[in-house]
Image (cartoon, helix red, strand yellow):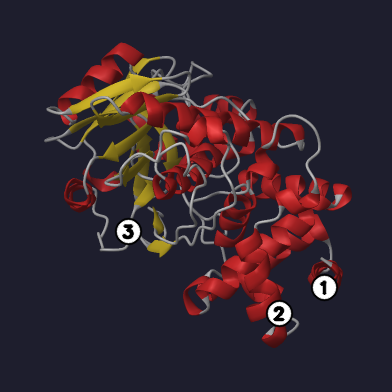
Amino acid sequence: MQSLQPACRRLSAVLSPPKRYLLWPLIWLFAPVMCCLICSPVVAGSALIRVSDGTTTHEGKIVGLSRTTCSLMDRQGQLTHLAVGTLRNFEKVSVRYEPFPVTTFREQLRKEFSGKYEVVGTTHYLVCATSGRASRYAQLFETIFRDVEQFYRVRGFKVQAPEVPLVAVVFGSQQEFAAYCERDHVTPSASLMGYYSLKTNRVALFDEANLVSAKDRTARPSWRHKIASSSLLSGPPRYHMPISGGQIPIAATSAVSGDTANTIIHETTHQVGYNIGVHSRLGGTPIWIVEGLATVLEPSGMREKTGRQLQQGRINQERAQWFAKRHRPGRSMGSLAKLVAADDFFFQQTLNSYSEAWSFTFFLLENPSRRRDLVTYLQILGSRDPLQQYTSKDRLADFQKAFGDISRIEVEFIRYMDRL
């Protein structure tokens, strides 16, 4: 193993920091089988590999590694977390990871959702839904993808193309949706309309409502959504995602019921953010920034491609009203630090925390200099090791690296919201 060190150091030197911390544990754990791989500079994080625990074989690329867990993204884009101690075989299938061809991917979905379901593809999506409806849903998913990507791009966020086609499943009944939730290890409930899963990288929802008529094209607010998280550090927690409305463009939603359109908008916003490089699917991203960006993007005025919309059209009215009338009167200074330092606030005061997350993110995006700080903050989050524990102290330190003293920016933020 000692003889591997020079080659390992040369390979590590050409990799970005995130790739280096993924590579080193793997070198020492699999030194015998990696000898043949070290000559290739594309192995870490880009090679298609096959690993086996003696009974099950997994194929994909390594996206995360600790001393105990190897995280693999398969050719559908789904994450699998494997116990390192159980692995018995490791081989390189190809020097470069590639997802399944779209035709193969589509056929796999057809087999998984056989019967009355069809699969329709767009530029970025494969949408599975009841026959005759999939194209209508696919149009909305694709529209929201382009709007959200454009939103990040024009504001200076570094975005990338999704590595795999994005999958969305729209069930024809709540009963079918609940059965899928059980298979996906997500607890169904009478109020749950849909969720985005970090593990499968899919959006799943249901639509039992009749398609809206030409006279009913405004999407109603919905509060029935969830994100299914799969953190390597803390297991698979789930947290609710309150969503507010705003109006959705008529052309995109005239064939989709209001609550379903709202669900698609919110879940697609999450899915896009996790697939164009804004957030990491391995976990560790503070909830406030994930939900802040998602709720900021709900109003169509924020996603508008052409022209500068009036501020009134960019405001998430429900979040703004809750902040001003329900949260602000009893809010104490220091609440921002609580929001940033830990996710507990979201479980203790759900509605207050979502209104604060929206308000603070909106404040940042409306100020050009603070918008640049936000880009810096997301870059800091993207450069950290997602497999390392993210302590409150570290979260506050990273925040202040980007924004400066948190007490000062909180004063600036509250003054802005009071004027708003």
Q: Is residue 94 above or below residue 51?
A: above
Depth order, front residue of 109/33: 109
Q: Mark 1 points at which residue?
A: 418
Look at the numbered disc 2 and give the secondary structure of its residue: helix
Spot occupied by residue 413 in the image (x, y as percentages of width and height)? 81, 67
Write the residue at 76% across / 38% down: 155
Q: What residue type is labelled 2?
A: Arg
Badge 2: residue crowd in 10 Å (few <14, some 14–19, many ≥20): some
Write the residue at 18% across / 31% down: 113
Q: Give the quarter of the image for residue 56.
A: top left
**Quadrant (top left, top right, bottom left, bottom right) of the C terminus:** bottom right
Spot occupied by residue 187 in the image (x, y as percentages of width and height)? 25, 60
Name the mark on residue 192: 3
Badge 1: residue crowd in 10 Å (few <14, some 14–19, many ≥20): few
Look at the numbered disc 3 and give the secondary structure of its residue: loop
Q: Mark 2 points at which residue?
A: 328
Q: How far apart are marks 3 and 1 (CA)?
A: 34 Å
Write the residue at 52% across / 71% down: 346
Q: Give the quarter of the image for residue 119.
A: top left
Report the side of 408 relative to 94 (left or right): right
**Quadrant (top left, top right, bottom left, bottom right) of the N terminus:** top left
Q: Say whether disc 2 or disc 3 marks the residue closer to the N-terminus.
A: 3
Q: How far apart are marks 2 and 3 (CA)?
A: 29 Å
Q: Do the residues labelled 1 and 2 touch (CB within 8 Å)?
A: yes
Q: Is residue 324 above or below residue 241?
A: below
Q: Is residue 327 above or below residue 218?
A: below
Which residue of the protein is positioned furthest toward the front in this rendering?
215
Q: Distance between the residues labelled 1 and 2?
A: 9 Å
Q: Which amino acid does label 1 sit on?
A: Asp
Can residue 129 be seen at all in this image of the molecule?
A: yes
Q: Which amino acid does label 3 sit on?
A: Leu
